[in-house]
């Protein structure tokens, strides 16, 4: 089943990339001549996504200007971006979760082949895109799988409790988005709701027995952009993509 809608969470300031992000949202850092957000929009629109909602926050007018140049791209301002974690951004966009869609972190760079693989995957109502590697660090969003069934997800999982990592891309189909938003709304009503990541909602659903699946994209190209060294890696990756596109068009 094809997916034609996506929500991108791009409200954060990206303080770990200072001074690069002192006056610029993380999603607008330059990578090989285009912003991170523009790379994401190109990939999503190339995959047939015709309705894209970008949740903004820090210096939102700069992101608005990018969106205004694109057909089918809208922005939604999260006024709580400076006091709430990304669960708050999902809550602000809760009415957009009205059917099948992709949810993408604003700091995850993904390839055309990766997104095509996720869209084409045969999964359940909620699917978390994962990759595998030899070792994981404290900042990785770790995942415990049983086959393709997700059992746990979180940064604080102990060694032996995980066998993959989330890359920051989810797919919702057949009522999965509604179940996710019900969990998000319940968590936002708790005292610490604004301090939670939205993947905590996925963890709670999985622990309660909900049908949460994983899609492995091992071997495909992607890069999270959190730290200065990530910018170097993302620049090299996008330079290679740009060169390949130029060669293909020649």
Image (cartoon, rainbow, N blue to C red):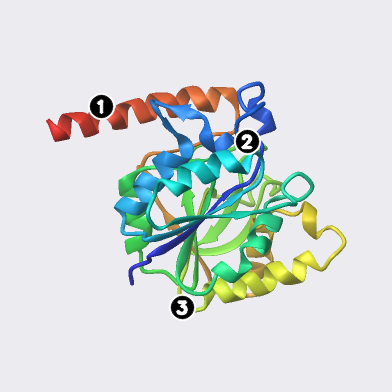
User: Which is in the foreground here, disc 2 or disc 1?
Assistant: 1
User: Which is in the foreground here, disc 3 or disc 2?
Assistant: 3
Mark 1: few, some, or many residues within 10 Å (few <14, many ≥20)?
few
Q: Is residue 249 above or below residue 194?
A: above
Tell me where residue 138 sits by quadrant. Answer: top right
Give the residue at mark 3: 174
**In the rendering, at what x and y percent does residue 92 appear?**
67, 61
Q: Residue at x 65, y 42 (%)?
A: 12
Q: Is residue 208 visible?
A: no
Q: CA distance from mark 2 to mark 1?
A: 32 Å
User: Which is in the foreground here, disc 3 or disc 1?
Assistant: 1
Q: CA distance from mark 3 to mark 2?
A: 34 Å
Q: Secondary structure at mark 3?
A: loop
In the rendered structure, the answer to whether residue 132 lies left or right of residue 142 reads left
Give the residue at mark 1: 243
**In the rendering, at what x and y percent does residue 36 appear?**
47, 36
Give the residue at mark 2: 137
């Amino acid at each position: 089943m094809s997916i034609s809608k996506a929500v991108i969470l791009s409200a954060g300031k990206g303080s770990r990339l200072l001074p690069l992000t002192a006056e610029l949202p993380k999603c607008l850092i330059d990578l090989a001549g285009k912003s991170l957000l523009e790379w994401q929009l190109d990939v999503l629109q190339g995959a047939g996504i015709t309705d894209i909602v970008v949740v903004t926050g820090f210096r939102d007018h700069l992101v608005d200007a990018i969106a205004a140049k694109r057909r089918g791209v809208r922005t939604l301002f999260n006024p709580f971006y400076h006091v709430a974690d990304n669960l708050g951004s999902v809550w602000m966009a809760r009415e957009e979760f009205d059917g099948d869609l992709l949810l993408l972190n604003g700091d995850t760079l993904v390839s055309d082949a990766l997104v095509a693989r996720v869209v084409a995957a045969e999964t359940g109502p909620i699917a978390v895109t994962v990759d595998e590697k030899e070792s994981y660090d404290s900042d990785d969003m770790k995942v415990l799988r049983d086959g393709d069934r997700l059992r746990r997800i979180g940064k604080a999982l102990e060694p032996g409790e995980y066998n993959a990592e989330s890359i920051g891309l989810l797919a919702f189909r057949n009522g999965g988005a509604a179940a996710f938003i019900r969990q998000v709304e319940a968590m936002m009503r708790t005292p610490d709701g604004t301090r939670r990541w939205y993947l905590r909602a996925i963890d709670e659903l999985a622990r309660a027995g909900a049908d949460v699946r994983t899609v492995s994209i091992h071997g495909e190209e992607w890069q999270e952009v959190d730290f200065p060294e990530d910018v170097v890696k993302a620049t090299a990756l996008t330079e290679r993509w740009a060169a390949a596109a130029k060669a293909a068009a020649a």
